Amino acid sequence: MAHTSGETRVDDSGELISPVGWFVICSLSFLLVLVAATFVLADMIARHSALEAASDEAAAISGLLAAPLLNQEVRDGDPEAMVRLDTALRQRLIDGSVRHMKLWDGQGRVIWSDEKALVGRTFELEESVSALLGTEDVVAELSDLSRTENDLEDQQQEELLEVYVGAVDADGASFVFEAYMDIDQMRRDEATITMWFVPILVGGVLLFQLVTTPLAVVMTRRIRRAQERSSRMTRHALRAAELEQRRIAQHLHDGVVQDFAGLAYAMPTLVRQLREAGAPSDVCARLDSASLMVQKDVAMLRSLMTDIYPPDLVGEGLYEALREHTSQVSQQSGLRTSLMVLPELDVTPDTGRLIYRVIREGLHNVVKHAHAEVVEIEVGHSADEVLVRITDDGRGPGAGERGSGKDHLGLRLLRDTIEDVGGELEVGERPSPGGTTVVARFPVDVTSG
């Protein structure tokens, strides 16, 4: 096939996953998101609950045990007073739920600690801790033992519940009670929440999918059957239109065209005979003009017949028909046209007629509306799709002309036809240097399915 140089590449676009498959994939993805969200929510709930419990326990230890036994004697280091306080507080360390405790005064000095080496040492209190002095407020967070004052304490456990409680001792002096508590109960609560909620969520989503998947299968089948019926109706309509076009072309050829052709052949002879017989020159001139008009009309009728029903739109005939049509448009309108067709393009007659119709309608719109000088036409295909691209350098798809949604009648009918056979037609603005691009995609075999 003697084509102009150039090639149009079209990507394969076969359907890899059915709608039901997408439904199942989306459902499973949603399930995974829910499970992940459940773990996050369980951690938040368990952490909030653990911090509240730790705050209540630390406040109770501070108010019921530490405050009544902390006085000036303890602050001065009196042995007996220190023993009473130490005995009472260490009882809370026996079960392991409280890992470490300290009592701080307002200057950041450790009044008492389960680590005796810290007693009497002074550290800089954080602003949030020093703000508790003189109050009964509580600050709790999930923390570790990385602070300087915790260097002598057991740091094997990575995370602990850290609680600070503001309180007043037996003499009315302010102090801060600090406690580090185990997070085992928080982890147990988190596991319990997860154990309850995850099966409920998983079961609910799976039950929903079990119920809706058959419905999705049924609906998909119905949609496909409807699409198949629509495709069959479209094919019947195309065939009916083809038969009607063939009938019109045959009537034109056998009737009007033959008569006009005979008249165009006879009129020059008649004019010559009239001149030889001495007929007036103005009469002969009018007959010459009428003869030329008849010859022009015969040519137009034959061109119209080719447009209505091209003789051969497969193989080499498709390229020749496209080349002839673009040449005619170029001669009549002054447009400079460029036609590129893949050498291996091999389509069915119905597909060939649709390609021809796309290019014919596209060129018609360019001539009528675009005010363009150059038109480039590309015809390519992939394994299962034909691509036709028509690009001009005109004024672009302005509102009310060839813009999407406001196409002229011929372009709207063409769009409907292409969509009926499972394709699409896009009309957009050419990026640079301006103009319009019309792109049509449809199956290689529009009669398939």
Image (spheres, grey):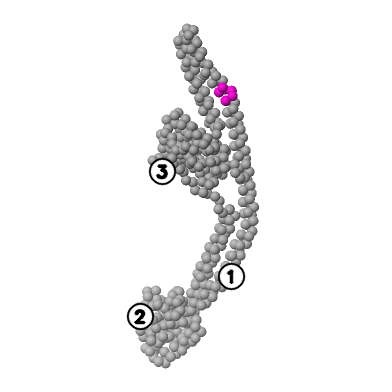
User: Mark 3: few, some, or many residues within 10 Å (few <14, many ≥20)?
Assistant: few
Secondary structure of residue under mark 1: helix
Out of 257 and 361, give the one closest to the viewer.
257
Q: Quadrant of residue 331?
A: top left
Viewer-nearest of labels 2 and 3?
Answer: 3
- Measured as percent of width and height from the top left, residue 360 is found at 50, 34
Residue drawn at (59%, 67%) of the image: 199
Question: Magenta segment, which residues?
Answer: 253-258
Q: Distance between the residues labelled 1 and 2?
A: 45 Å
Residue drawn at (41%, 43%) of the image: 431
Residue 123's disc number = 2
- Residues marked 1 and 2 touching at CB (< 8 Å): no
Secondary structure of residue under mark 2: loop
Residue 196's disc number = 1
Is residue 93 depicted above or below 350 in this figure? below
Residue 187 in magenta? no
User: Mark 2: few, some, or many residues within 10 Å (few <14, many ≥20)?
Assistant: some
Identify residue for label 3.
431
